[in-house]
Amino acid sequence: MKRKHYKEKEKTEKLRTVSGRITLTASGFGFISVQGCDNDFFVPPQFTGGAMDRDVVSASIFKDGRSERPIAKVEKILERGRSTVCGEIIAGRKLRPLSKRVSCDITVSGNMMGAKKGDWVELTLDDDSFGEFSAGRVRRVIGEAGNLQADLSAIASEYDIAPPYTADFEEEISGLKPLEIPREDLTSLFVCTVDPADAKDYDDAMSVKKDRDGNYELGVHIADVSAWVRQGEKLDFEASKRGFTAYLPGRTLPMLPKSLTSKMSLSSGKISLSHSIMIKVCGKTGMALSSRRCRSKIHVSARLTFDDLDLFIKEGQLSESLSESIGKRCEDLRESLSTAVELFRKMRNFRSESEEFLEIETECVRVLCDEGGNEIIGLRRDVQRDAEKFVEEFMLAANVEAAKEMLAKEIPGIYRVHPQPFPEKTSDFCEFMKDAFGLSPGDISSRKVCNKFLRSVPEDHRKLVIIDAFLRAMARAFYSEKNALHFGLGKSRYAHFTSPIRRYPDLIVHQQFMAYDGYGGLRSKKTVAYIAEDASRKEALNDEAFWAANDRLKLHFLREKLSGWNFPISRRSYQK
C-alpha cells in the first residue's frame, strides 16, 4: 500500500497550537482529540515526537497542500497518559512493550528484582520519561512469557483491567437490597431471554404481541441495575473504576460482583425487577410509532440460546432441550416467537431502506478456554446469524427510544457516536484495495457506496482480508455527552441502554432516568462528559486486551498441536 509522506517544510502553513490527548495506532500514526473540537487532528508517524498512546501533548497544526484536512506535529509531551508499561525483558536491560501502540523499547533502570530475559515485567515509568527514549523501574515481575496464566496476567496489567472483586467485598454487599419503588406489573406477558449457552448473567429480555389494529407491541425489558447500584455509593465507584466487564479467553473480570448479578439477572422461573421500554411498531411498515418507559416486574417464561433461536428462525422448530424446559407452554412459545420473527423482519427491512445501515458480515475465530484459564479447549468460528441479528434489532430499537427521551426531556446523558471515516484512512483503504485486489470502493464516506462495495466483495479467501481492512478504515465509535451521528447504524439519535450489568455507560443512562423519575439527583452534563470520555478510553483498552489475549492464545493452541516444534511465543510473533 502506498503511504503519504509529509514534509513540514514543503507546502505547509502553520495554523495554530493545540493541546489534547493523542491516540496512536499500531501503524505508527495517531490522532489528537481536543476538547471542544468536533474532529480529531491527524498525526503522521514522523510527527509523534516520542509520545505514547494516551499522552496529553502540545502540537502544532499545519495546513498541508496535499491534504484537505490539517495535520498535527507533537511539540511537547505535557502529561503521560500512563504511569506503567508491561512488556517482556529482552537483552541489554531493555523491555519490549506488550502493546502495539508503544513502538519503542524501554530501558530498565534500578533493581531488576530477579527479572530475567523472557519474563513479563510491569515497569513504573520514570518521572522524566518525556523524550524519545523512555526508562522505568521494575514494579513487579509477572511471570515467564509463554506461560498461559502469566500471559493473561500480563495482558490484564498492560491494558489496565481491574482484578476480580475480593471475597471480602462480595461479603460486604451480600445483604444489598433493591430500591423499593412503584412498578408496573407486566408478569402476564410472555417474556423470553436469548443468550449464549454458557451465559451466566441475563440483563435483557423481550416480549412481542399484536394488537387489534395489526400493530405490534415490542417490550424490551432490561435488568433494573440502577435499583441496586445507586449513584455515588461504593459499589457505583467500583463499577465506574472498571467501566466494563472484560472478557478475556478463560478469564472473565466482571464490572459488578457475581453475587449481585445473580440476584438482579432476569432468570427464568422468578419475578424479576426490570426497566422496560414498550414500543408500538407499525404492522405494515415496521416503523416505531411511539414508546413509553416504565419500571416493571416481569416473569421470564423461556430462556433460549442463540442456537435455539436460529433453529426456530430457519426451520420453525423448537429444539428438544428447549421443548423439555418449557413443558406445557410450547404452543405459547411458538406463537410468541413466530410473531417476534415476523416483527424482526419488518423492522430490519424498514431500517435497511430508511437508514441504510452498514451491512457487514463479520466473523472471527475465538479461543475457547476453561474459566480457570489453564487449558485451551479449542477454537470457534463466530459468524453473525439471523438469531444474533434478531436480538440486535430489538435492542437497537430500545437504545434509540432511550436516546430520544433523554433529548426530549433534556436529561444529561451518554450517547453512542460513530463519526464518518477520516479522509486519510479512506484514501489509504482505497489505494490498498486497488493495489492488492484491483477493486475500486468509491467514496466510502457514503453508507450507500459502502454497502454497494460490501455487496461486491468476492466470496472467497480474499473476503476476510477485505472486510478487516474495511473495518480498520472506519472511525472508532465512542461515548459522548453530546448526541451526534452514528454512521454505521445510520442513526441520528442513539444511546446504550440495554446492558447495564456489563457496561457502565448503560448504567449511567439508567441512573439518570432513575433520578429524573424522582429517586436521586441528576448528574450534571459536565460530570457525564467526564464519564463518557473515561468510558471510551476503557472500552478501547478492553477491546485491545481481548484481541491481544485471543491472538496469543491461538499461538498457544498451535504450539500444543505442533508439539515438538517448540517455536517461541513472543510479542512480535502474535501481534498483527
Image: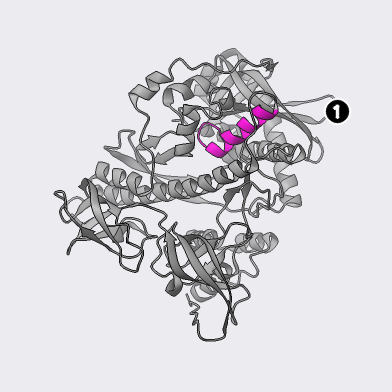
Q: Position of residue 38 (x, y in %)?
A: 64, 59
**Element at label 1:** loop
Q: Position of residue 424 (x, y in %)?
A: 56, 70
Q: Residue at x 63, y 65 (%)?
A: 444
Quarter of the image with the C terminus is bottom left
**Which residue matches tag 1?**
213
Residue 220 visible in the picture: no
Asked whether residue 262 is drawn in magenta, I would say no
Residue 37 to residue 10: above or below: above
Q: Position of residue 467 (x, y in %)?
A: 53, 59
In this view, the residue in front, 451 or 78, is 78
In this view, the residue in front, 441 or 412, is 412
- Residue 222 location, quadrant: top right
Left or right, 341 with respect to 33, comes to: right
Q: Residue at x 47, y 50 (%)?
A: 540
> Local crowd at mark 1 within 10 Å, few (<14), some, or many (≥20)?
few
In this view, the residue in front, 569 or 441, is 569
Q: Main secondary structure of the magenta part?
A: helix
- Residue 532 location, quadrant: top right
**Which segment did they paint magenta?**
500-516
Q: Residue at x 49, y 23 (%)?
A: 321
| Amino acid type at image mark 1 | Asp
Residue 139 to residue 428: above or below: above
In this view, the residue in front, 535 or 18, is 18
